[in-house]
Structure formats: structure tokens, C-alpha cells
Image: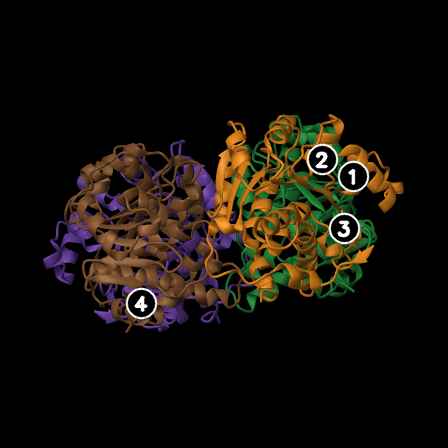
Chain colours: A purple, B green, C orange, D brown
Amino acid sequence: MKKLTENILYQVIKKRPEQSYKGTYGRVLIIGGTKQFGGAAIMNALASVHSGAGLVTVATDPSNFTALHSHLPEAMVVNFNDYLIPYIQSHDVILIGSGLGDRLDLVKTTFAAVSAKQIMIVDGSALTLVAANHLVWPTSRLIITPHQMEWQRVSDVPISQQTFEALNSSARAHFNVKPIVVLKQFHTQIYTDNGSFELTIGGPYQATGGMGDTLAGIIAGFVAQFSNTSLDDNVLAAVYIHSAIADELAQQSFVTLPTQISAKLPYFMKKYAN
Amino acid sequence: MKKLTENILYQVIKKRPEQSYKGTYGRVLIIGGTKQFGGAAIMNALASVHSGAGLVTVATDPSNFTALHSHLPEAMVVNFNDYLIPYIQSHDVILIGSGLGDRLDLVKTTFAAVSAKQIMIVDGSALTLVAANHLVWPTSRLIITPHQMEWQRVSDVPISQQTFEALNSSARAHFNVKPIVVLKQFHTQIYTDNGSFELTIGGPYQATGGMGDTLAGIIAGFVAQFSNTSLDDNVLAAVYIHSAIADELAQQSFVTLPTQISAKLPYFMKKYAN
Amino acid sequence: MKKLTENILYQVIKKRPEQSYKGTYGRVLIIGGTKQFGGAAIMNALASVHSGAGLVTVATDPSNFTALHSHLPEAMVVNFNDYLIPYIQSHDVILIGSGLGDRLDLVKTTFAAVSAKQIMIVDGSALTLVAANHLVWPTSRLIITPHQMEWQRVSDVPISQQTFEALNSSARAHFNVKPIVVLKQFHTQIYTDNGSFELTIGGPYQATGGMGDTLAGIIAGFVAQFSNTSLDDNVLAAVYIHSAIADELAQQSFVTLPTQISAKLPYFMKKYAN
Amino acid sequence: MKKLTENILYQVIKKRPEQSYKGTYGRVLIIGGTKQFGGAAIMNALASVHSGAGLVTVATDPSNFTALHSHLPEAMVVNFNDYLIPYIQSHDVILIGSGLGDRLDLVKTTFAAVSAKQIMIVDGSALTLVAANHLVWPTSRLIITPHQMEWQRVSDVPISQQTFEALNSSARAHFNVKPIVVLKQFHTQIYTDNGSFELTIGGPYQATGGMGDTLAGIIAGFVAQFSNTSLDDNVLAAVYIHSAIADELAQQSFVTLPTQISAKLPYFMKKYAN
């Protein structure tokens, strides 16, 4: 298992070409945030926009529109109870699951509508819903971001046996297309077709609600915009930068809040663009 | 085609006369922001108020009132489903179209109510609605801010032929009053009766949702308040400052968010007032 | 007419006694903000709380509650369509009128309920409503904050004749209790029983919507808390500090937004407390 | 009565263990905030999250959801009119009472559902409701945060007789489980089984609405996360840090707003973690 280093940021974050437009940096659709967990979708969106996604639309409970726009007028909204299929089909990247509660219907609709050329990130409650309802994974390019318990549910591999080998064997059985797996734990591990990687930075100041929603949003922002580097590398860079910013904040701060990490993203990324 | 320089800011941004009032700096009416695209009207308003418009009223979907006021209690609001004609007639500057979705009715009402002495800025979805429905342009003083595709729709000049000559000939055919055209593209071009101008600053860190809404709001703020310089010069200065601020922010920041640009406006403008 | 100097701030803003409580610094009730003009009440409240009022309650349209709390969870709210009399009677200071639109009923209720020992500040649309409907002024201690046109309506003294003598004679005819008049104009004038005063600081960077709402809120905050100095001096100090902060901000900023002035209040006041 | 010193912060605030998760730092349920007093629950939550609680859920009037999320997407929400018992039972720490108005039903439900191994903090209007309705205190671990008048109501000890001895005797009669009492006054006193303590820092710049809601939120955040130090010490540290931050802010600021104190928490706490 390779250790992730700061080098991944230099590889992925590149100075943008002069002639480029919003569309160049991808269209992200976030599907999340029930009435009770609306903050999760807000944190997804803050992370995606601040990391540089071209256009971000949030499909969420309409009770969350105002709080989202209070943080981020840069994002567009759609009621996730409306007919979502045209939205799902017209975005480059779909992030589904943060604060999604028991909305199995939305997971089913998304899985049915997403195509092989799109990138889908599945986070949070969507993972539990997939496992509990034995949903068949779609053939889109897939990134999943489970905690250990969520990964156990999805993979049927108990936490105690979540070794690389068990994981790969399980993944083979459960997915049509092998996903990139971001297994969130003490030292987060990332499993890809091209090897597995371990994060050795970050710390317990990140142990606070919303940290995972922010990570999922950064992943969405990175895969949407850095189309010249591989999907694997984009995910690795997103995982790395999330904790690297937390480490920097933690020099001054006992706990590092998710919204603070997103606010730092454009400044932190600047250091690596060349 | 002349290149815009920083000099335009010294020409337009003048120290305010001591004896002056809110009314001296113009009344701006922003018409935009459906339920889904409310952020666009918020970004219009943030830009107008921070650039120094005297009074700003936002006619928008009522679901956007709270988020607008969370950003900007300085702005007043009106439900854009109410009878808008008195509002349209009593404001010096009308900015219509950012995040307006399919609200053709609002474009028609505004075009019918606006008078020759008012200044109207037409942005975003309003441009597409005008073109698709072959609306007749009103005789107000007119500024339009199309992307290249929007300009193709409005002017019937395909992107590949959007030269200065084609543009002028097209403009002649389509407008009663020749508009100032802000053609947003890699190097934004501005077409006026007194020549055409090219912006050579700005960069790809601006390629993010809401950038155009912010530009439209700055234009509204400038034309409302700088009544001693020509409309042309005010538009040129607004276009220039929008990218000049982005350039300054980009020294520290990978992507420059629209709300960050608006927040910088009063400080940046101060450097040029004399 | 005496010129106001910084000295008024040293006279009024005193270090707080060690043994004191929220109640020591007064209870302020703000009545303002229709659905369209909710920002006015928000700016009242921001100014009152940041200037140090002990407790602030905002009676406003319920559609404004969320935006107010997004700025200021420190304030309490009440629906101004509910039975307000107990609120009016239980607060030390009533500020009515900012963004009140055509709500004559609320002015009447307040005038009927307020008592001689309370302090009432009447601002904005309430002044126009009083004049248009020939309301009888109550016997509370009274501060009014008209623009010149509002003062003409209230006093029947045309702008061209708004001299000190005309004002005093008019005031005698119209009021049971002679109010402190803050006549907002190029050089704001303050008329009191103990003489008249002129403000010679401030500038055109303040010519922006909401500036008066912020001034009214600072007056409320000052009269609520500084009970050891006279009402006159508290009003003079509030008028002075409002423009002194704007002057300081204007060294860096082309236009000084009302919310920026409120945010600076606690820091600016600190310099004078001794 | 012992005087609290900065030493309590070194004792309680410890560097977090590397291997830890959100759950390690406790689940806090805040029950408060009617439609009129929603700001109180927002200030509770800001304090809890910024002090480092692992997960914070706010049970409040649904009209407060949006303003809460505008401040703090990190918190989850639940309508406090819904069936709350599962929420009460599944959280480590319950903070009830800030801005709770006359919602006796919620106090009764909470008292009935809370268990002996949970920690409950009772603040503000909940204390008045308990006293007025002679509720029997539950057997949970209990912290109460009365003002002197609230303590008189709860303990039947008049303010003039609120000595340590009277208090202890009263407490014995009224509580099944002796609570930690934070008696908020000029020099706040804390009564515990292991002695009584006096706060000698803080000042009149804290005499502003919402200060107590912020203190209650910090207490919740501390007891939720610092499980290696005693409940007594956690409460003492929370009381101390609340005023220590105010003292620091007051060096620059005439009045110290509750939201400013919460914003400083992570930075201030960092100085003591070792």
C-alpha cells in the first residue's frame, strides 16, 4: 500500500488553460440533504464550488434552498422531489448520498438514469440504502466513500477483515464496474485498479460532523475539473488536500470545521498550480 | 479594436461630490432569479450595492427574499409575480435576465414599460427568451451582455462569423436603438457607437458559475451612479474592474468566486477615486 | 448652532460598571420591516446590538425572522401582526418606522400604548404616516429622525425655510412633548431643548440605502444603555459615531455599507470607554 | 469557595488521541428555540460545535432550521414537535431550555425519557417551567445554569439568602441527584459535590442577550467530548473559557457578542491542548 504524499497535489492541480469556460470545469449535480440533514448538501456544495467546479446544481429538499443560497449564491438548486432524470443525464459528475436519509427512491432513480460515461460519487446514507436494498450498481464510473461500517454493509466484509485482499475479492463480487473506494478511517485508504494508497496526514481535529460531506464535495470538484489527470489521481488529490488543509488549520485551531476547510480551498490549491 | 486599460477606471470612478444623496447615485431595479436560479439575482444585487448604487430593489421569486437579505439587508425586494410596472417606471436602471429561466412574461412586461430615458441591461436567460420569441427591442438606452452563443441567438450571426463588421450589420437590423454589446468570451469585447474595445486582462480562474451575474450587477451599479461620464465609458469601466479584481484575487486564489469579487469592489474602487 | 466634536463620544461612552446585567443596558423594541423592506429592521437591529443594547426584540413581518437570525441570533423576534401592546409597554426604548411601509395601524397602536417614561424613536415611513394622517404625537420622550422632505411633511415647514427658528416654532405647534429632531441632510442637524448642533463629519460614501436605518439603530442602542448621560447627549453621540465610523471606513472604501458600520461599532466604541 | 484559575483549562483541554472518531467526542441534542427565541438554540449550537462536540442535533421549531443552517451546516435538525423520544435516548448529552418559552410539554417529555447514564443540562426557560410546575427532576447526571432569580424559583431560596449553605440544604430537598449548579451572577459560582467555585474573570461587556445560551452550549460541548476528566471539571472549564474569551475580546471591543465568543473557541482552546 503506497503512502500518499504532497506530490499528488502537484500532479493534479494544474494552472488552467487561458482559453477555457465554466463548461471546461464540469457540471456537478449534488443529490442530498433531506429536511433534517440539509447541512450535508450545503457542505457538499461549498466544497465543490470552492475547489473550482465549473457549475454546481444541488438537488435537495426545497426547505434547504435558502440556507444553501445564504452560503453560496453561486450554486443552483432543484427540488429533489421533482422529475430529476434530465438533471442526472445532463451533468458530468453526480454526487449522491450526503444527508439523504431514507430516500431510496432517489438512489434508484439516479442509478437507473446515470450512464457509463458519467462519474458518480456515492456517499453517506446512499451507501447504506444500496446495501440494505441489494441495489445493483450502475455501470457509470464509480467512486464510493464509505466509513468502515458502511463498507462492511456494502461489501459484506466485516470490519475486522477489511484487508486489501478481502476488499478486492468483495468488490469483484458486488460491482459491475470496480469502483474507486475511499475507505474513511484512522488512516484513510483508497483502493483503485492501479493500486491501493494510504493517507498518513490529517488528525483527530477532523472528528466532527460534516467532515465527510466536505470530502465528497472536494472529490466532486476535482474529478469535474481536472480532466487531464486520471480519475484515480483526482480522487487521491482530493483526499490528500482535505486533510492537508485540516492540518494547516489545526496549527491554530483545536477543532477544524468543515466550512473552514472549504473556505481555505482556493488559497491552498493556488500553491500547487503551475 | 482598442484595448482597454486601467486608465478607464481613472476616467470613470470619481470622488463623489460632498453634497449628494442616495438619489444622486441612482435607483436600480433587478429583475431575475426564479426559485431555481435565485443565486443569480443575489449576485446581481451584491455587485450593484458594493459598487455604490444608491438604492437597489430586487424583483424576484419570493422564495429568494430571505437568502438575499441574509447577504444584503441593504437591498429592498418585490415579488416579481406582483404588478411590476410602477417599479419598472420609477427606477433609473433596469437589469433584467440573470437567472430568469423561462419567464418570458417578465421580459415582455419590462420591454413594454421601459421608457427611452431609462437604461436597461439585458442579461442571461432574457437574451435567449428575446431571440426565441422574436421580441421587439424597446427604445430605452440598452446594454446587452451575451455569451457568444446567446449573441448568436440574438443577432443571427453564427459564432464563427462574430466579427465586428458582422456584428454591426446584424445590430443594425435587429435593434431600434443600437445597444452597447458586452460579448463575453475569452477576451471579452465591447461594441459601442464610438468604437469597439477588447479586454486583455482576466483569466480562467473566473470560469465559475455566477461570474456573469456579478458583471451585470457591476454594470448596473456603474451606470446608475457615474452620470458625469458616458454610458459607454461606464460599461467599459465595469467590465474592466470585474476582471481587474479577479486578477488581484487570483494572485492568492486558484478560483475567484463571484461573491469575493463583489466584496472587494468598494476597496478596489477607492484606489481610483480622486 | 454648535458643531459636534469627537468630545461627545468621550462624554457619553463610559466604561461599564462591574456589577451590571443585561437589564442595565436597556430593552429595545424595534417595530419595522414589511415583507418588502425587511432589511431596514435587520439594519436597525444590527446597529442596536453592536452598539451594546442589553436586549433587542424585533417586531416585524414573520417573513423577515430567518434573515434577521441569519445575521443576528442575539435578537429576539415577534410577529408585528400579533397583539403588540404588552411588548410596547415592557420595553425601555421603542424604535418604530424603518421599512414600515404603509402600516399606519402599527404606528397608531404604538402611539396609544407608549407611556411618558419610555423613549420612542420615530424613523422613516412612520414619519410620513404620522404627517399624512395627522396623528397626535404621544407624550413619551421622543426622538425623530427625518430626512428634509419627511421633516417638511411632519412640521409643515418647507425645506427652503427649515431654519432653526421656523423649526422651533413649528415644533411647538405640533408636539405635546418637544422631540429631539435629527434632521438628516448634507450636514445633519440636531435640535434639542438645550440648543442645536451640527455634524461636520461624514461624507458622500454614506449615500447608500440603509444608512438611516443604521443610524436609528445606534440611537436606540445608545439611549437604552447610557442612562447616566442626558438623552440629548446620547443622541448627539450616536449621530457623531455613525459618521465617524464611516469616515474611518472611507479611508479604504469607496462606499461605506450600513452593515460594515454596525460591525465596526464595538471596536470603535472601545476607544472612548474609560 | 475556591477561585477558578486558568489552570482548569490545562487540566481539561487535552490533545485528542490520534485514533478517534466523531463518536468519541459525543452526540449532543439541543432542545430549544421557539419561533420567537430561535436565536437561543442557534447560539447553543454554535458554541457546542465550535467547542468540539462530535455531532450536534438541534430539536427546535422548524421555522429556525434555515437560520441555523445559514450559520452552521455542521448541525443536524429535528422538528421539536415531532416524536422526540428516540432522539433523547440516543444522545449522550441533552441541553434543554434556551429560548424554550412555555413549552412545558418538551420539558416533561425529556425528563421522562432521559436515563441515569446521560448528562442533561437545563437552562433558561426550562428552569422556570420546572419550578412553576413542580416537576420532579430526573435521575440523569444533571447540570443546571440558573440566573439568580431562576435559582430562587427552582430552589425556593430567596436571592438574599443564596449562600452556599442555604443552597446545599435546598438542593438536597429538591433533587434526587444533586446537580452541578452554575449560578450566573456578577461573579458566577459553581456548586458541585466536590466543593464550590467562584469565577473572578469576565466583565460587563458580556451583559448582552445570548451570553447564557452560549455558555450552555460550551458546557454541552465540553462534557460531550472530555470524557477523561470529571463532569465537575468540564463544567468549570467551560465556565472559565467563556469569560476568558470575552476578556480577550474586550481588549478591543466595547461589548462582546455571543457569536464572537463562539467563533473564537477553537483558536482559544488550541492554546491549552497538550
Give left or right: position of C221 versus C212: left
Residue located beneath label 2 in the image: C127
For the residues bearing labels 2 and 1, Cβ distance under 8 angstroms: yes
Q: Nearer the viewer, mark 1 or mark 4?
A: 4
Which quadrant of the view contains residue D245? bottom left
Residue at mark 2 to residue at mark 1: CA–CA distance? 8 Å
Number of residues whose C-alpha sits closer than 10 Å to that of mark 3, classed few (under 14), some (14–19) or many (20 or more): few
Image point (51%, 27%), residue name? C83
Residue A125 is marked as none
Residue C151 is marked as 1
In the image, residue B153 above or below residue C262? above
- Say which of A128 and A63 sits in front: A63
Say whether mark 4 and mark 3 are on the same chain.
no
Give left or right: position of A208 versus A248: left
Give left or right: position of C20 versus D189: right
Residue at mark 1 to residue at mark 4: CA–CA distance? 56 Å
Which chain is indicated by disc 4?
D
Picture coordinates of residue A205, whole percent (x, y): 31, 64
